[in-house]
Image: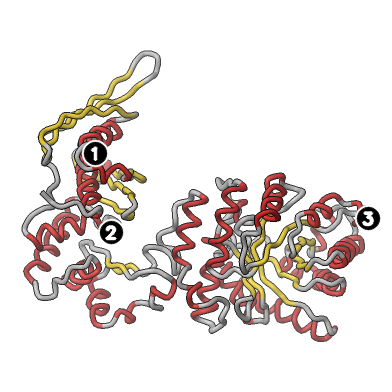
Amino acid sequence: MSGDVLVYDTTLRDGAQQEGMNLSVADKLTLLPMLEAYGADIIEGGWPGAIPRDTEFFAEIAKTQPLSRARLAAFGATRKANIAVEDDQQVAALLNSQAPIITLVAKSDARHVIKALRTTEEENLRMVRDTVAYLVEQGREVMVDLEHFFDGADDDRDYTFAVAQEAVRAGASTVIACDTNGGALPDTVLARVTELSALFDEEGLTATIGIHAHNDGEMAVANSLAAVTAGAAHVQGTVNGYGERTGNANILTTVANLHLKMGRKVVTDDQLADLSRVSHAVAEIVNIAPYRRQAYTGVSAFAHKAGLHASAIRVDADLYQHIDPARVGNDMRMIVSDMAGRASIELKARELGLDLSDRPDVLSEVTRRIKDAEALGYTYDATDASVELLIREIAFGERLSYFDVESWTTHLSGSSDGSNGAEAVVKLSTGAGRSVTVGEGVGPVDALDQALRGGLCQVYPELDDCELIDFKVRILDPSAATRATTRVIISMSSPAGIWATVGLGRDIIEASWEALTDGYIYGLFKAGVPVR
């Protein structure tokens, strides 16, 4: 345990229930060190016996033992009704997983006991008691998730609390109050956890109380903090708030708030500084685009756009930031837009490594160009590469030059059998001479990209590892029909990082061409290729 509140990560089990997420055994093994890196004390690996992939995962873990500090937990249920615990195959699978911690889900809402389990309240209590005691006798630490704890307590408080007491008396080290439906509010969580803690004290029971919150009311993190305020010393959640429906409590946000706002040293400062890296790395593995505005770790979490903010930040960065972003491994970022003043441009340039504090003429010209361009339809909120190209052009008197475009054309074809394709021809001049490159693609933009890349990579092998990763199109004036202005934002990546450029045109092809060419120019610049 890193601090006075235990951090329990359930990304690999509860987080993996998110729609569209499908984690392989290899994915889970890759994620383990990332979850340990931010400070998780316990990592829940899955439900062996119920899910074959999870059974395989625990078998692999038993062979490799990849964790250096965090402990592994296997998740499962109490024995089935009217079956001896020794005969329950899923309970046996929990033991066979060799996980040192077993987390059992137990019904704590009497209505669920009767309607879902179709058994009696008394038998449910025996199921909890028998399973916990049996697993403790086998040398495992047992934790019990009290499913529907808050809804159950609202309906029949005595029974819900009786389930918690039964678990502790049978040997459970921890009971976790679960807001399974995600509808509780912080004042309810505060009151119920306080009541449960007081009952344990009255009964002379010793156990850790935990919280497992879902985000259906967008209160999961707030509810987790409320539970800690009430005496909980165990918080559960998932990286980036993954999970079914609206997700679970974001464990990274919970950790940051506990550590930075509530003074609970749940992780080390080094682990805290790894939050942003872990957030983005996990997003890549699970193949879900990171939420830019996510608290603490999002790329826009400390992004400033308004000129008023920029003027104050230039004097003292803390005036418009609730924490120093470096503490969670993030950075302050200035967003350039038509709201930008000279202070915003100066700070943005400084972020790019350019000192323009003594060049008011450049600051004024960049500000004017940005405002004029956005009036036409360009946007620079999320296209930092286009901004940097513009700043460097004005500051140094010329655009970065790696190639000249003689011409480009595209051709789209189709056939009666339903097949279609596109072809593009790009004529370039580079330091190596003139080239004519043909590209084929599923559409005209893809074909243009293939032709442009083909011509450039012959001269600039630095672009071999550059790839287009995102493509966004917006019609700015739909009422103008086919005469509407089109804006395209293209994102690219390479070992040098990720960047985005913007293009504007009469159609999607023209707008894409501008964004593509600027994207490759910036990619060459980031790769350190000398300008012609």
Residue 457 - label: 1
Spot occupied by residue 80 in the image (x, y as percentages of width and height): 87, 53
User: How is the protein colored in the picture?
Assistant: secondary structure
86 relative position to 163: left or right: right
Q: Residue drawn at (67%, 51%), measured in percent from left and top?
A: 60
Residue 437 - label: none
Give, as a three-letter code, the residue at label 2.
Asp
Q: Secondary structure at mark 1?
A: helix
Spot occupied by residue 294 in the image (x, y as percentages of width and height): 45, 63
Q: Marks 3 and 2, Cα distance to the nearest angstrom?
A: 62 Å
Instruction: Give whichever of discs 3 and 2 has the lower sequence position.
Output: 3
Depth check, mark 3 against mark 2: the one in front is 3
Residue located beneath label 3 in the image: 84
Seen from the viewer's position, the closer of residues 276 and 180 is 276
Give the answer, above or below, for where 444 lies relative to 530. Answer: above
Q: Secondary structure at mark 2?
A: loop
Seen from the viewer's position, the closer of residues 515 and 418 is 515
